[in-house]
Amino acid sequence: MLRLHFHPMSPYSRKAWVALLHRGDAFEPVQLKLGTGALQRPEFLAISPFGKMPVLETGDAEAIIESTSIVEWLESRGPRVLIPDDREAAFAARHFDRIGDLYLMAPMATLWWEPRSDGAKETASVAATAWQLFERRLEHRPFVAGAAFTLGDLGAAIATDYLERLGVTPPEAIAAWKTRCFEVPAMSRALAESLPFIEPALTRRAASLTS
C-alpha cells in the first residue's frame, strides 16, 4: 500500500494529501511529529535525503519526494483526475501548478517563517502579480484548466488560503475561485483536519511578532 509521510500544517504535504484523497487512492497516512527531530532521523532521511516532506512510499525501490512529482506519479498510474487528458488543459494544469508553487507558496512560506525579512516585505506584491495571471485564466472558466478542479488549482488555492490567514487579501475573483476550490470534498476535509494545527501556530506567530 502507498504510505504518505506528511504533516497537516505543511502546505506541500497537504497538496499531496489532497491529491490522494481526491483521487480515491488507498494509502496509509503517516503523520510526522514536528519539533521532535523526525525529519532528521536516519530512517526518514533514508527515504527523503533532504529531510523534507511530503514523501510517498510506493513499494518500489525509491520513495517519491516533492509534492508535484507525487501527483504526477499518481496520475501516471491512472485514472487521470488532476491532470486532464486534453493537451491544452493538461498544460494549463501543470503551468499554473508551477506559478502557484513558485509565486504563491514560496513567498507565503517566507512571510510565515521570516516575517521581518526583506523577502517577506515583497510577498504581497509577488502574490498580486501571480493572482493577476490566475484572474486572466479564470475569466471564462471556473478552474484554471476548465470545468474541473485540477493540479493547477490545488497548491495555489492552499497557498492563497494561507496568505489570507497571514493578512494578504486576494482580489474578489481569486477569493471566489478559492471558495470553489475548497468546496471540493478533499480540500474541505484536509483544511478541517489542518486547522487544529494551523490556528495555534498562527497565534504563536502573532505573539512572537508583538513581543
Image (cartoon, rainbow, N blue to C red):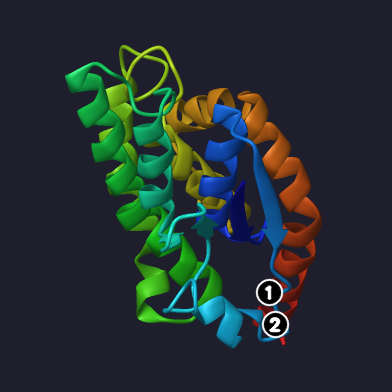
Q: Residue 145: x, y in percent? A: 32, 22
Residue at numbered disc 1: 205
Pointer 2 with pointer 1, Cβ within 8 A: yes
On the rendered structure, is 146 left or right of 201? left
* Amino acid type at mark 1: Arg
Q: Which mark is residue 208?
A: 2
Q: Residue 88: x, y in percent? A: 18, 21
On the rendered structure, is 123 left or right of 132? right
Q: Quadrant for the C terminus, please.
A: bottom right
Q: CA distance from mark 2 to mark 1?
A: 5 Å
Give the residue displayed 56% in from the left and 56% down from the top.
13
Q: Which mark is residue 82?
A: none
On screen, residue 204 above or below 153 = below
Q: Residues within 10 Å of mark 1 (few under 14, many from 20)?
A: some
On screen, residue 177 above or below 3 = above
On screen, residue 131 above or below 166 = above
Q: Residue 103: x, y in percent? A: 32, 54
In the image shown, does 70 or 168 lie closer to the viewer? 70
